[in-house]
Image (cartoon, helix red, strand yellow):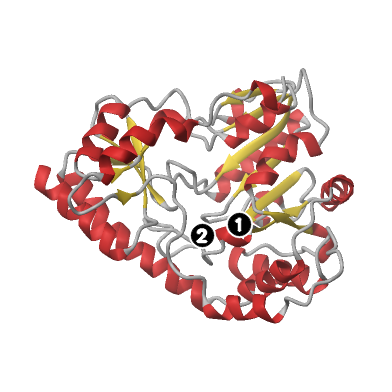
Amino acid sequence: MSVRDLADYPWDAVAPFAQRAREHADGIVDLSIGSPVDETPAVIREALAAATEAHAYPQTVGTVPLREAIVSWFERRRGVTGLTPDHVLPTIGSKELVALLPTLLGLGAGDIVVHPRAAYPTYEVGAVVVGATPVAEDDPALWPAGTKLIWLNSPGNPDGRVWNAAELRAAVARARELGAVIAGDECYAELGWEAPWDTEAIPSILDPRVTDGDATGVLSVYSLSKQSNLAGYRAAFLAGDADLVNRLLTARKHLGLMLPLPVQHAMAVALNDDVHVAQQKERYRARRETLKPALEAAGFRIDNSEAGLYLWATEGRDAWESIERLAEIGILAGPGVFYGPYFSQHVRLSLTATDERIAAAAARLRQIS
């Protein structure tokens, strides 16, 4: 298989419901894709502007200040010690890394790529492009022989599930039994809502409680799109096994996968500033506290959603019926079937809308409760 064999882009199927939602007298409340709507913090925009003298090609490996900022951030915010700049690498957003990792690792036909049952579809896309076999399975005991790459997503998209340190440790142990690389997609890790994650840091797959300080075969993937409103900057990075990072660096050099130098400078500033992250989290907390009870009053059950940027909801009917019902009141959501065949009755609603639009959605939902 190849990129020519990919299915139609799934979000195209939502277009008729988006049009119906736009016809609402008070306009659409778009809770579908999850693209940030809040402003990029001034400290980051100023850093970008200060670095616009960038006439030379940037280095794929990233600047020393950026790599040092990533290492410092992992220790300060994630409790991950023992990393050096040789353990980290910037990427052009996290989606390209998720899609390209099987390619960069040299996987192909006969190899298996495991991903979550409730899954961001790019995990499967990356496997399909190289001819590998994607397998959706959350239980490490059921990960099959022949697995070469395992994706974890904690907190999960779409379901907001968090893997605790003991669960991550068991997953890493199983990956090592199989001789597989295990990668944790962790880009919502600053957004914990329910106990214990309302007060306790969400663990990284590189946490010493998980790896005993040995990152062999383990990678963490992270993005600043959500915590810093940098989706348009394509600001992300990976960290972990130094040998793996070096292999990926070599491949990315050949492919010309270089993060623009002004963005690298802005990323370093963003990673060193925790104030704006806390402020953004409070915005999302307030929106969640407005939207969640309104959905429940309208007959939806919220599953998992203990962390992350989404509410994973069901009213016990076909997802497309729920999507239509929501569109009738001007709300656009994402159908659960986009995230795997096991969720035909779930919808995903994002917290990435303005306070005013979230309040409008809550008011409309209460009217149909």
Q: Amino acid at mark 2?
A: Lys
What residue do we see at 57% from left, 46% from top?
Answer: 166
| Percent x, y of residue 20 | 26, 38
Query: 223 or 192: nearer the eye?
Result: 223
| Left or right: residue 179 compared with residue 331 | right
| Left or right: residue 252 compared with residue 203 | right
| Left or right: residue 54 compared with residue 185 | right
Query: 199 or 124: nearer the eye?
Result: 124
| Percent x, y of residue 108 | 79, 24
| Left or right: residue 362 compared with residue 44 | left
Disc 1: CA contacts within 10 A as few (<14), some (14-19) or many (>=20): many
From the image, tell me which residue sits under label 2: 226
Q: Quadrant of the C terminus?
A: top left
Query: 100 or 162: nearer the eye?
Result: 100
Q: Amino acid at mark 1?
A: Ser
From the image, tell me which residue sits under label 1: 223
Secondary structure beneath label 1: strand
| Percent x, y of residue 246 | 87, 51
Q: Measure how far apart labels 1 and 2 are at the Cα level.
A: 7 Å
Query: 10 or 111: nearer the eye?
Result: 10
Above or below, 314 relative to 223: above
Q: Would residue 145 be seen by someone viewing this image from the given angle?
A: yes
What residue do we see at 60% from left, 36% from top?
Answer: 122
Q: Quadrant of residue 299?
A: top left
Disc 2: CA contacts within 10 A as few (<14), some (14-19) or many (>=20): many
Q: Quadrant of residue 208?
A: bottom right
Specify the label residue 331 is tagged with.
none
What residue do we see at 24% from left, 39% from top?
Answer: 326
Q: Quadrant of the N terminus?
A: top right
The answer to whether the residues at label 1 and label 2 have Cβ atoms under 8 Å apart is yes
Above or below, 125 relative to 109: below
| Percent x, y of residue 236 | 66, 57
